[in-house]
Every structure is written in C-alpha cells, then in structure tokens.
Amino acid sequence: MIYGERKVKAPIRWAMVGGGKGSQIGYIHRSAALRDHSFQLVAGAFDLDPERGREFGAGLQVAPERCYADYQTLFAAEAKREDGIQAVSIATPNGTHFAISKAALEAGLHVVCEKPLCFTLAEAEELRALAERRQRMLCVTYGYAGHQMITQARAMIANGELGEIRMVHMQFAHGFHSEAVEQGNPSTRWRVDPRYAGPSYVLGDLATHPLYLSEVMLPQLKIEKLLCARQSFVRSRAPLEDNAYVLMQYSGGVMGHLWASAVNAGSMHGQKIRVIGSRASLEWWDEQPNQLRFEIQGEPARILERGMGYLYPEAREDDRIGGGHPEGLFESWSNLYYRFALAMEACDAGEHDRVKALHIPGIEAGVEGVRWVENCVRSADLGAVWVDYR
C-alpha cells in the first residue's frame, strides 16, 4: 500500500511547457506529479501570452522570474542556474511536441510529453536516438495505464489464466463531438486541423490509448499487418477522421479490432478492452476502472475489485486506499508520474536495469503509437486495404 511516502530521494525539479489557464490536461499533470512528493514545480512557460503565463505561474507559487515567455528561454535560463530544472512536461497542441521535445533533450532534460509524440515515424526515431544519446528519459502520458486493474490483467494473462490468446477487441468511442462543436470551442478546434493535430484525429487522439493498454497487457504480441477505414461524418473535419475501424493481425494468428470515434452519440467515454483466450476472457471499461470482468467459459462471470487481497501483488502495489473506495483517473496518472520520477532518478544514477524494470510508457511506446497511426492512415488512404506493418 502507498501511504504517501516519498519514492525518490529528492523531488525532481520540474517545469511545464503549456498547461496554463483553461488547460484541463495541465491540471491533471500537476496533480499527478506533485501528489507523491516526486516532483517540485519550480518553473514554466505556461502560456503563449507571457503576461498571462506569469499570472498563472504566480497562482501556482512559481517565482515570477521563473515564469518564462517561451520554452527556448525557459531551457536556456534554467541551464544557467545551479538549481535549474531537471525535467519538463509538455502539454501543448500536437504540432509542437516534436520541436519542444527535441529542444528539451538537447538541453539535457528528462521529458514527459503528451501523445502523440510527433507526426511522423522519422521524427519519432530521431527523438529516440537523441534520448538514447543524451541518456535522458522521454515518457508519454498514456494516462489510463496507471490503473491497477490493467496491471492485474497483465499478470493474469502472463500466468495463463485465459489460456491461448485468440482475439483483442479495443474501443474508445465517445459522442461529445457528434456535431461540429469545434466551431465554438478553440480547445477542440485545433484537434481537427491537420496543421496542429497532424495526419489523424481520433486515431491519434483516442485510439492510441486502448492500443497502449493492449501493449501493457500483451507485451508479447506484435502486429504483422493491419487494415484501416476512416470516415469524416462531420464533413468539415475532412481530411481528418472522426470515426475509424482498424483490423489487426498479430504474430501467431491472434486477431485484433479497434474502433475509435468521437461521434458515438450518447456515449460518455466508451473506452474498453477485451482480451479473449481459449479458456476465458477479460474486459476492462474506463468508466468502471476499479473493476475487471473475468469470464471463464461455462462458469458465472466474476467481477474482480481493486484493492482486494485476491489480486496479484503487483496490482496491489499501487493501492492508495483500501478496497471498496473508488480510485480514478487522477490516481492512475499519479501512479505513472511516480514511476516516471523513479525512472529519471535511476537514469541519472546510471542504473539502466532499474529503469527497464519499471513498466512505464517510455520512448518505445511513443514511437509505436506514431508508427501505428502512420500505418492506419496509409491503409485508409489506399482504400482500406491490408498493409504490412513496418
């Protein structure tokens, strides 16, 4: 059980780029990072408007002289301080991720970046090479992966409780953009603009979340080929899709299916993952994140609950309160952030085996997400055909 004890020897001096006033995702980054005394927010370039950024930083008790006008000034000025930042989180629109991540790594900083990491596989591989060369952590915020029942599912599958894996069904299909809401909402508008969002909308923004959950649960599976069909039901969003279907063939004959949509009218969130084996199936739904449905063929369905003694020890490791009390997305992000801090601390100490032992969405997860989206777009643009995964 976690009782709020510090996991790292000293809090990592940390800054944010973006995440200022009106940023919902900025708040969850700060709440998660600060919860376990793993990070200390000491600087930032919070807003495109420097004055508004300084005012926002003051409300977070960041010294005015450490609230910078832009990320370039932030990195340069902090590098000159003995107490300068060690890490930065990037909570800006997609189109800026590559440039800011590259600049941060070149400045010798650890990086936590919103997904997608960048727009192209070539850019992703450049960031991977740079992170390896500079010996820095580059982490990606697949925030649902910190839920305890995802770890429980991984352990059950590894222990053979489902039998031979046959199928993986994934979805992230909400209905909040079933109309052209972006016309009156700037925070949504950039997500459907290729200049800022990149080559996809729901494939990159939504689908990569359950895709990464499948990678956590089933690390042995490798995609061999896929087929993608994508649609723009709100026509003003074209060429970006607001609905997509993806079929995947994995090594060993395992099949996968993923549905991503922002136009599933009436759905609140609709993120689910179901893993089907020869003996049993598991299903997790992010609207009921404290439960894991376990169905053995020929037996009544079982609902496994977070925090209970019958779970695997690695799943109970991140309990923040006893079973029966609900935990949610902020706890999941907090679990990721304290692991990010442990990975950064281990990286600084040259303890690379310790880094590898931590299950976190690192640079490989970021690269794989970009690779997957790129292949989906390629398949769809060729007329929804099977393409070899590369």
Image: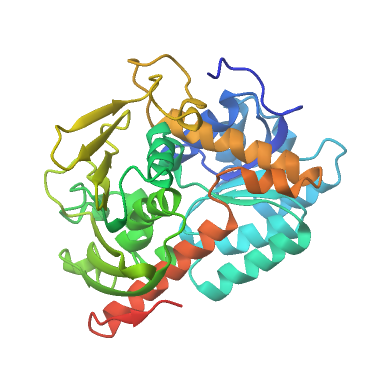
Residue 81 image point, x, y percent: 85, 40
Q: Is residue 250 visible?
A: no
| Residue 344 visible (yes or no) | yes
Q: Is residue 93 left or right of residue 74?
A: left
Quarter holding residue 243: bottom left
Give residue 283's position: percent from left, percent from top.
26, 42
Q: Nearer the viewer, residue 294 or 374?
A: 294
Colouring used for the render: rainbow
Q: Residue furthest bottom?
A: 382
Which quadrant of the figure has residue 86?
Answer: top right
Closer to the camera in the image, 350 or 164:
164
Q: Is residue 377 above or below residue 276?
A: below
Q: How many numbered discs?
A: 0
Residue 228 relative to residue 41: left or right: left
239 over 2 or under it: above or below: below
Residue 377 located left or right of residue 4: left
| Residue 325: image location, x then y, percent | 35, 15
113 up-or-down from 203: above or below: above
Q: Which residue: 77% across, 45% down?
A: 351
Using the image as rendered, state which of residue 289 and residue 21 is in the foreground: 289
Q: Which of 161/14 is in front?
A: 161
Residue depicted at 48% across the width and 35% down the height: 333
Q: Position of residue 166 (x, y in %)?
A: 27, 59
Q: Is residue 79 left or right of residue 174?
A: right
Check the image and report above or below for 126 versus 160: below
